Amino acid sequence: MYQAMICAVALALLALLQPAAAADPGEAFLHLKGGRTTWSFDDFFGDSESSSTYGAQAGYRWHINADNSLGPEIGYIDFGKVDDDIGGFASLKLKGTAVTVGLNYQLTFGSGSFFLDARAGYMHWRGRASSQISLGSLGSYSASGDGSGDGEYAGAGVGYYLTRNFGLSMNYDFHTTTIDHQRVRLGSFTVGADLRF
């Protein structure tokens, strides 16, 4: 379902941008980032944990006009690993990565030096979960396994181009998916290096 939606949006976007592409083709971009991700769990205790994270996004933006550009992107993010303690009698350890496919928009201003980015799309999650439950005098039970799933992401950033092709940015990205029958929200604050080609 998500794949079909992304394909439909991409085809519509290409059709809409055809005249702009002929006049001004635009540019490829690469965004490298690192920071912290907060994992929020929809379990009974509603807790959250944080981990180190890093990732990258690459794509192509067509110039709609002098200040606005839009195009497709693909990305990869490593969310790190966390240990979710559930009420003192159980724990769930998680680590995961994701591949993303979506759209990227950029607005430049201040003679093209400052920029705002926005992005959204589909996420495919791959991760590993291990759980342990303590049953007191009866002992404990543990299990682990790999899994994957689908989700969505959206984000925004603000930055400054130090040169025509290199800039620095601060970003927030929000990812959501289902892990081990729990709805999990992952909010990432990152610092990024932005390159244009």
Image (cartoon, grey):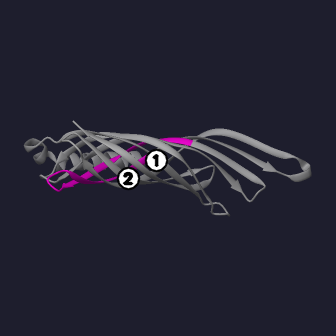
Residue 76 visible in the shown view: no
* Viewer-proximal residue among 65 and 165: 165
Judged by its main secondary structure, the magenta piece is strand
Q: Is residue 116 left or right of residue 49?
A: left
Q: Which residue is identified by label 1?
A: 35
Q: Is residue 25 left or right of residue 74?
A: left
Amino acid type at mark 2:
Asn
* Viewer-proximal residue among 150 and 58: 58
Q: Residue, x 36% and y 50% (percent of image)?
A: 5
Q: Residue, x 38% and y 53% (percent of image)?
A: 171
Q: Is residue 35 magenta?
A: no
Which type of secondary structure does the marked residue at label 2 adopt?
strand
CB under 8 Å between discs 2 and 1: yes
Q: Which mark is residue 171?
A: 2
Crowd class of label 2 (few under 14; some 14 to 19; many from 20; radius 10 Å): many
- Residue 57: x and y in percent read 36, 41
- Residue 148: x and y in percent read 55, 42
- Residue 43: x and y in percent read 65, 60
Give above or below for 149 relative to 111. above
**Region in magenta:** 96-123
Amino acid type at mark 1:
Gly
Mark 2 vs 1, N-terminal side: 1
